[in-house]
Image (cartoon, helix red, strand yellow):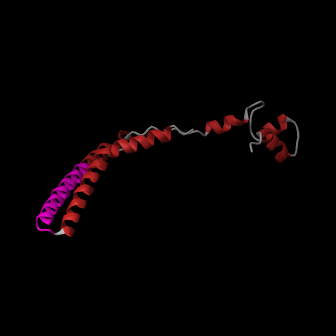
Amino acid sequence: MHVPIDHLLLVLTGGGSRLTRDVAWGRPRGHPAGALSRLADVTMTPDPGQLPGGSTLQQLTDGVGGWALILSLVGMVVGAAAWALGSHSQNYQQSFIGRRTVLISGLAALVIGAAPAIVNFFFHAGQGVH
């Protein structure tokens, strides 16, 4: 239920004229009540270059992403080898673990590659909330 601010002020101040209420609340005469809340609005424009070390942090992020992709590739090669050895030796457990490792490594590479787009998607979705 939405209660107009004027009705709330009448209750809190015990009545009185509009001038009395405006002066009591520190507003100039005739000042709309919603304007004070708009003064408190903040905005954000992310820019890593605005802080010291922002470019270093970007390089560090790129390096960690590169290492993660390399490790994903290693996991995929090891998983494929285990899958092949398990299937040739009729070892179901080794074959299953190798197959699972290949799939997980592939999904890890997918997530690593899509991570910037996923973060940007949620950031822009959040910017649309008003």
Q: How many marks?
A: 0
**Quadrant in the picture for residue 16:** top right
Residue 36, horizontal then vertical, whole percent: 67, 37
Q: Quadrant of the N terminus?
A: top right
Image quadrant assignment for residue 88: bottom left
Of residue 80 and residue 73, the one placed in the foreground of this image is 80
| Region rendered in magenta | 63-90
Q: Is residue 113 left or right of residue 17?
A: left
Q: Residue at x 79, y 41 (%)?
A: 24
- For the C terminus, the quadrant is top right
Vertical relation: 86 (above or below) 1: below
37 versus 105 height, above or below: above
Give the residue furthest to the top: 30
Q: Is residue 28 left or right of residue 77?
A: right
- Say whether residue 74 is magenta: yes
Q: Main secondary structure of the magenta part?
A: helix
Q: Nearer the viewer, residue 81 or 44?
A: 81
Q: Residue at 76% of width from left, 40% of height from top?
A: 5
Q: Position of residue 103 (x, y in %)?
A: 25, 55
**Residue at the front extreme, as displayed:** 90
Image location (x, y in percent) of residue 57: 31, 47
Query: Is residue 106 located in the magenta-colored stretch of the structure?
Result: no
**Residue occupying image coordinates x 17% and y 61%:** 83
| Residue visible at 18% across and 60% down in the picture | 79
Q: Where is residue 44? Give x, y as percent.
A: 48, 39
